[in-house]
Image (spheres, helix red, strand yellow):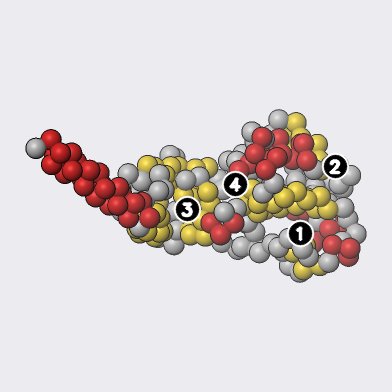
């Protein structure tokens, strides 16, 4: 009798293990909507899975659809202006998000940036043809995981950039407009702050100054910092 009971327990454990393995490897589709406290849909917000950027964004009605596996734990929404909101997946197939306060429109005039040659936004040029200095770091290198903020990365790795707290100044730039802050471009989108970007989200950072930043007109007079974030295919 005891042997029979043990045999049934053994079969149950095998069945549970197989079933769990199938579930954890199965891809499921999660849908939902993203809005702010004024009930305004947020378009062009980036979908994160377990803290990593994907290639999915919300549509013009704030809706999204993304596939995940049973091993994924969290789904999040990243906006350039209001940071990140995350939720536990917990087996759910529909997850809605609400950001606190009012979220301004996320820019849609995306500019694609490559690595080599350098994509300046309006034209692609060879690195040797850029007369103004260009600084660049590859955020995928393991040593950058030790940095707490993106400002620490810039301070420690990019020459010619002066970082004090969250204030940035690119040295040897000609200031034609008020202030000394450079122009920030994240995944091709001009943004006003990079406070919400974590080091582990960064694929690369390029710093343009002088004539290499002139293509942006007066907006680039204090230099330009171009940040490319990691996407799902970069994992």
Q: Which residue is mark 3?
A: 47
Disc 2: CA contacts within 10 A as few (<14), some (14-19) or many (>=20): some
Q: Earlier in the sequence, mark 1 or mark 3?
A: 3
Q: Which residue is mark 2?
A: 160
- Asked which secondary structure carries label 2, the reply is loop
Q: Quadrant of the C terminus?
A: bottom right
Residue displayed at 69% across by 51% down: 204
Q: How far apart in space, not on screen, are marks 2 and 4 (Cα)? A: 23 Å
Disc 1: CA contacts within 10 A as few (<14), some (14-19) or many (>=20): some
The quarter of the picture where residue 112 lies is bottom right
**Mark number for residue 149?**
none
Dots 2, 4 in contact, CB < 8 A: no
Q: Position of residue 25 (x, y in %)?
A: 38, 55
- Asked which secondary structure carries label 4, the reply is helix
Q: How far apart in space, not on screen, are marks 1 and 3 (Cα)? A: 28 Å
Q: Which residue is mark 4?
A: 201
Residue displayed at 60% across by 63% down: 109
Q: How far apart in space, not on screen, are marks 2 and 3 (Cα)? A: 33 Å
Q: How far apart in space, not on screen, are marks 3 and 4 (Cα)? A: 12 Å
Using residue 42 as the reference point, say whether residue 133 is left or right of it.
right
Q: How far apart in space, not on screen, are marks 4 and 1 (Cα)? A: 25 Å
Residue displayed at 80% across by 43% down: 158
Q: How far apart in space, not on screen, are marks 2 and 1 (Cα)? A: 20 Å
Q: Position of residue 5 (x, y in %)?
A: 13, 39
Indicate which label's residue lies in the foreground, 1 or 3: 3
Q: Which residue is mark 1?
A: 216
- Asked which secondary structure carries label 3, the reply is strand
Q: Quadrant of the N terminus?
A: top left
Q: Earlier in the sequence, mark 2 or mark 1?
A: 2
Against 235, residue 51 (above or below) is above
């Amino acid at each position: 009798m005891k042997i029979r009971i043990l045999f049934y327990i053994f079969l149950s454990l095998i069945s549970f293990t197989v079933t769990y393995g199938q579930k954890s490897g199965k891809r499921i589709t999660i849908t939902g909507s993203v809005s702010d406290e004024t009930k305004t849909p947020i378009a062009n917000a980036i979908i994160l899975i377990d803290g990593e950027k994907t290639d999915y964004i919300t549509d013009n009605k704030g809706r999204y659809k993304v596939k995940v596996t049973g091993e994924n734990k969290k789904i999040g929404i990243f906006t350039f202006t209001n940071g990140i909101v995350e939720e536990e997946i917990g087996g759910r197939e529909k997850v809605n998000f609400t950001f606190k306060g009012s979220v301004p429109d996320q820019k849609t005039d995306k500019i694609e940036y490559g690595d080599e040659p350098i994509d300046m936004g309006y034209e692609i040029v060879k690195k040797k043809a850029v007369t103004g200095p260009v600084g660049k770091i590859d955020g995928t290198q393991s040593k950058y995981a030790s940095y707490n903020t993106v400002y620490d990365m810039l301070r420690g790795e990019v020459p010619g950039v002066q970082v004090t707290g969250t204030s940035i100044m690119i040295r040897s730039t000609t200031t034609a407009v008020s202030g000394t802050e450079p122009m920030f471009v994240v995944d091709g989108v001009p943004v006003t702050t990079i406070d919400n970007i974590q080091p582990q989200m960064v694929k690369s950072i390029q710093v343009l100054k002088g004539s290499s930043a002139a293509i942006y007109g007066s907006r680039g007079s204090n230099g330009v910092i171009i940040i490319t974030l990691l996407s799902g295919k970069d994992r």
